[in-house]
Image: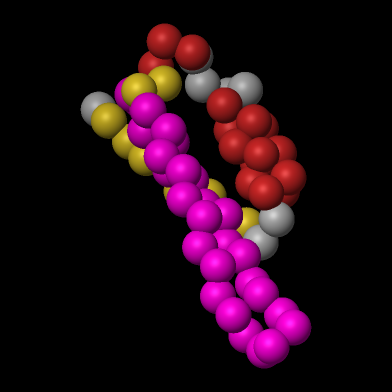
Amino acid sequence: MIKVKLFDQEHEKDLELEMNRFLERIEEKKLLDIKYNVAAVQEDEDEQIYCFSAMIIYRA
């Protein structure tokens, strides 16, 4: 069975840490793909909000 695990963080280092913790729990041969995305939204003149997200596709 193919499954996905979704991740969403405001900081790229938090995303990296969360994904690495998950990847430690699955066998490398079960990893199929990783999709990564960054979105930025201008809130005020001086504030920009980032959203770092990823999806790990793996075989269960």
- Does residue 36 appear to the left or right of 57 in the view shown? right
Which of 19/59 is in front? 19
The answer to whether 58 appears left or right of 49 in the picture is left
Q: Is residue 32 above or below residue 9?
A: above
> Can you tell which quarter of the image residue 50 is in?
bottom right
Residue at 41%, 21% (x, y): give it.
31
Residue 43 falls in image quadrant: bottom right
Asked if the magenta segment contains residue 49, the reply would be yes
Residue segment shown in magenta: 33-60
* Residue 11 in the image, given as x and y percentages of width and height: 70, 55
Q: Quadrant of the C terminus?
A: top left
Relative height, residue 29 to residue 11 (above, below): above
Residue 8: give x, y in percent of width and height.
55, 56
Magenta part, dominant SS: strand
Whether residue 5 is visible here, answered yes or no, is no
Could you tell me how many numbered marks the image carries? Answer: 0
Figure colour scheme: secondary structure
Q: Residue at x 27, y 30 (%)?
A: 2
Q: Is residue 46 above or below residue 53?
A: below
Q: Quadrant of the N terminus?
A: top left
Please indicate, yes or no, whether residue 26 appears anywhere in the rendered image: yes
- Furthest residue toward top: 29
Q: Position of residue 19 (x, y in %)?
A: 60, 37
